[in-house]
Image (cartoon, grey):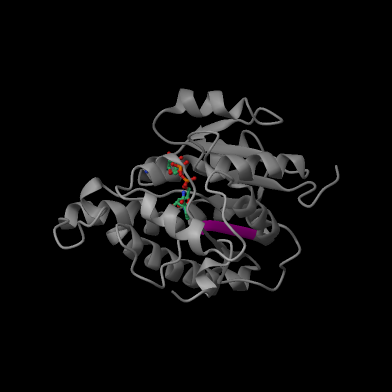
Amino acid sequence: MSGLLAGKRLLVTGVITDASIAFSVARLAQENGAQVVLTGYGRLSLVERIAKRLPEPAPVIELDVTNRDHLAGLGDQVREHVDGLDGIVHSIGFAPQSCLGGGFLDAPWEDVATAVHVSTYSYQALATAALPLMAPGSSVVGLTFDATKAWPVYDWMGVAKAGLESASRYLALHLGPKGIRSNLVAAGPLRTVAAKSIPGFEQFEDAWSARAPLGWNLTDSEPAARACLALLSDWFPATTGEIVHVDGGYHAIGA
Ligand SMILES: NC(=O)c1ccc[n+]([C@@H]2O[C@H](COP(=O)([O-])OP(=O)(O)OC[C@H]3O[C@@H](n4cnc5c(N)ncnc54)[C@H](O)[C@@H]3O)[C@@H](O)[C@H]2O)c1
């Protein structure tokens, strides 16, 4: 087996369509020598159908990342396909509609709690559920949307992402002694199911199209996926708690 991830065994969450960032990660990972196990949420038969479009059809494990039983059984389910894990990709985000599109001042706590449970706490929950399968040298990678700023329409999802960015640093702190890294990729806007559920998302699209110094393709998730592969590989052995921007350079430019 050759390639950047030759021989690595990966658990990839977050595939729902072939536009999902996670789908690009899974495809590129397989093309680069990795063995991939997917998790699917909700419409499992749809995820299984999408999984067949990968270069190698990948097994799909059901995982609602807020479900304690699913998390408790994850290790056994993964072991049915691989004998351990060298990497995990957290590509999961969700917020109820009240939390998005300008609803910051009105969103009820129950909805905010859901957003934080699915999009923030789940990073720790997934990593700890899979921890018994991981050895020193393993890598956990998640996806964020630059949470250092307040964005129009992103609202409580932005708060959840700020929490995710902090959670990744704490995971780096607590898993570092075990030789396990935690890093995030801050992607620019991409037209996925999650993005389309954000009312006013086109504001991001317009801003990026106008200002990203490298330009930005709203339908190409491969650059973000490539960064995930790099962070899963052995080429960032001393990097953890980091956020790599894959946004055409947008974050570096003033208005
Ligand atoms: N699309 C963008 O513009 C963009 C930009 C930066 C970061 N991100 C982040 O990338 C990640 C992947 O999103 P995407 O854009 O590929 O969209 P997507 O809709 O393809 O993926 C989101 C995934 O989250 C999963 N999910 C939701 N609730 C879940 C739960 N309870 N348990 C398990 N899985 C659950 C969905 O099934 C779906 O597969 C998310 O964290 C998102 O916030 C997206």
Query: Does the magenta-highlighted stretch encompass residue 141?
Result: yes
Q: Is residue 22 left or right of residue 201?
A: right
What quarter of the picture does the N terminus occupy? top right
> Which residue is rendered at x = 56% and y = 51% of the image?
89
What quarter of the picture does the C terminus occupy? bottom left
104 and 51: which is toward the camera: 104
- Tell me where residue 156 appears, x and y as whole percent: 28, 60
- Tell me where residue 104 appears, x and y as whole percent: 21, 61
- Tell me where residue 65 appears, x and y as whole percent: 40, 46
- How many marks overall? 0
Q: Main secondary structure of the magenta part?
A: strand
Using the image, determine if residue 45 lies above or below residue 135: above
> Which residue is rendered at x = 53% and y = 38% of the image?
19
240 and 71: which is toward the camera: 240
> Which residue is rendered at x = 38% and y = 59% of the image?
120
Residue that lies at the very extreme toward the front in this rendered image: 210
Q: Which residues are magenta?
A: 139-144
Which of the 4 quarters of the picture holds residue 71?
Answer: top left
Query: Does the magenta-highlighted stretch encompass residue 12?
Result: no
- Judge whether residue 125 can be spotted in this image: no
> Which residue is rendered at x = 38% and y = 66% of the image?
163
- Tell me where residue 24 appears, x and y as whole percent: 62, 42
